[in-house]
Image (tube, rainbow, N blue to C red):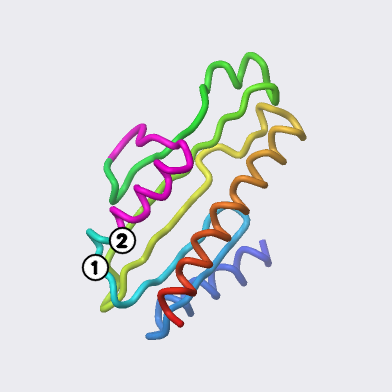
Amino acid sequence: MMNEEVLDAEMTKAENTSSPAVVIEKHRASYFFTGIDKETLATKVEEFLLGKGYKLETGNKFAGQYGKGNKLMRVLFGAFVKRFCWGIQIDEVGDRVKLRLAKDEKGYVGGVIGANQVKNEYASITTSLKNWHASMHS
């Protein structure tokens, strides 16, 4: 419980500052952009995820769920079938645009191997987004 409070405090701090910020937590990440509008950011994120083999499963590019792999096959065959799913939320926060990426599936169905697959994919995506964010704000 103590860690959640610290993480939430960091999130609140990032939301209330005027400088660009990236907050990466265990199951979600938030990126605060300046100099880009909501529509352009949503299109760029969608192109990025489509390029990595994801498809929009529910919602839209501003608030949707992107997935890759078959959920039923993952349940049946565990770690032998890869399944990744991310929730995306893009909102305007004052003069900035906030991108939030959240794990919609943690990989537990695939056991330890499945959870590590999701963890590694999450790290890959958050690192790519962090690097892109840094390139826009340098």
Location of residue 17 by image quarter = bottom left
Instruction: Report helix, strand or loop for mark 2.
Output: helix
The residue where tag 2 is placed is 41
Q: Residue at x 70, y 26 (%)?
A: 79
Asked whether, in this view, residue 54 is left or right of residue 35, the answer is right
Q: Nearer the viewer, residue 104 or 82?
A: 82
Give the SS element for disc 1.
loop
Query: Which labelled disc corresponds to residue 37?
Result: 1
Within the image, what quadrant is residue 74 found in?
A: top right
Q: Residue at x 47, y 66 (%)?
A: 132
Residue name at image x 42 percent, y 85 percent: 19
Q: CA distance from mark 2 to mark 1?
A: 6 Å
Contact between marks 2 and 1 (CB within 8 A): the answer is yes
Query: What amino acid is found at the position of numbered circle 1 in the picture?
Result: Asp
Q: x, y percentage for residue 84?
A: 54, 36
Residue range (magenta): 41-59
